[in-house]
Image (cartoon, rainbow, N blue to C red):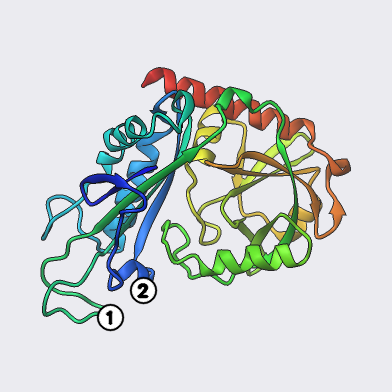
Amino acid sequence: MKVYLNGEFVDEREARVSVFDRGFLLGDGVFEGLRTSGGVVIALDKHVERMRHGMEECRIATRGKMGEHFDPVEMGPLTKRLLDHNKASIKNGDAFVYWQVTRGVPAEGQPRRARVLHGVQRPTVFAFLSPAAAVETYIEPESRKVSLRPDTRWTRGHIKAISLIGGVLSAIEADESGSDDSIMFRDGLITEGSATNVFLAKDGKLLTPSLTSAPMLAGATRALVMEADSSIIEKPITVEELLAADEVMLAGTNTMIAAVTHLDGRPIGGGKPGPMAKRLLATLVKAIQRDVETQ
């Protein structure tokens, strides 16, 4: 498998990153997970915008600032080139593509683990891909058993940072309890899953936590669904409202739409994917197809 690393496409066995890279030592970086369909990046503009905002807020140099830079808009054409380099492994251009940008390796004379670096900084840019199922094959939502876990992450959950220990521990604790995934909460309000946004159905209405109600990620898949269905209500969602929901769903680039069938061992919606989960998946598939056609 070929990967992208700092301007080159190289065999994964030959790719090397310094042990002094700040992504390794400090988790100092951001990432994006893209899905391609027929070789086209789904919701590319949303991923580019989110990575650009993340890099800017983290003060990782983008084009036009000091040093040697990476512009997130390059993810589009570089992803297509990465697909071309891996034609033998990726059928029909359907893949999940991971992009990561760290602050890079301190230049000569700069301290190795200083919290603040001054002078020229060259970000480390890395990408790899793996095969994904074609979008049109998603007919039924995946079923998941979920555990509620306290959200112990930092307060900048809107940044897609590579320091994911809070989410990792949440997922591990869910696994230890016999669940497939977790849904996190902070101060009594639902935030998100370990790698997904949360939706719920109540009395025939679809709802999702508002992005300003608690620190959480503005998911690209979440945005696609909400643009396609203007009836979805954004509001702060309490733990009690989640527990009383008729259906609970998770949405993400790799997940697509998953139906939560059990929450802390208790069946939700009869313990199987319900009509609103199926509606949400159908909405997403159509939104993706429209996005691909317009590109």
- Residue 270 is left or right of residue 49, and the answer is right
Residue 123 image position (x, y, % from top left): 23, 59
Residue on which disc 2 sits: 26
Quadrant housing residue 81 = top left
Marked residue nearer the N-terminal end (1 or 2) = 2
Q: Is residue 71 left or right of residue 192?
A: left
Kind of residue indicated by mark 2:
Leu
Rendered location of residue 178, percent (x, y): 79, 61
Q: Quarter of the image for the N terminus: give it.
A: top left
Q: Does 74 sit left or right of 93 as displayed?
A: left
User: How far from the left and from the top, in percent, is residue 91?
Assistant: 48, 26
Which residue appears farthest toward the top when viewing the image?
Answer: 293
- The residue furthest front is 13
Callout 1 amino acid:
Arg
Residue depicted at 26% across the width and 40% down the height: 73
Residue displayed at 62% across by 40% down: 233
Residue plotted at (55% across, 58% down): 213
* Image quarter of residue 266: bottom right
SS for tag 2?
Answer: helix
Judge left or right: residue 145 versus residue 7: right
Query: What's the CA distance linking mark 1 and mark 2?
Result: 8 Å
Q: Which residue is located at x 19 percent, y 75 percent?
A: 117
Classify mark 1: residues with Cα within 10 Å, few (<14), some (14-19) or many (20+): some
Q: Report which residue position mark 1 lands on.
A: 113
- 83 or 162, which is in the foreground? 83
Crowding near pointer 2: few (<14 within 10 Å), some, many (20+)? some
Disc 1 on helix, strand or loop? loop
Does the CB distance between marks 1 and 2 fall below 8 Å? yes
Q: Nearer the viewer, residue 199 or 36?
A: 36
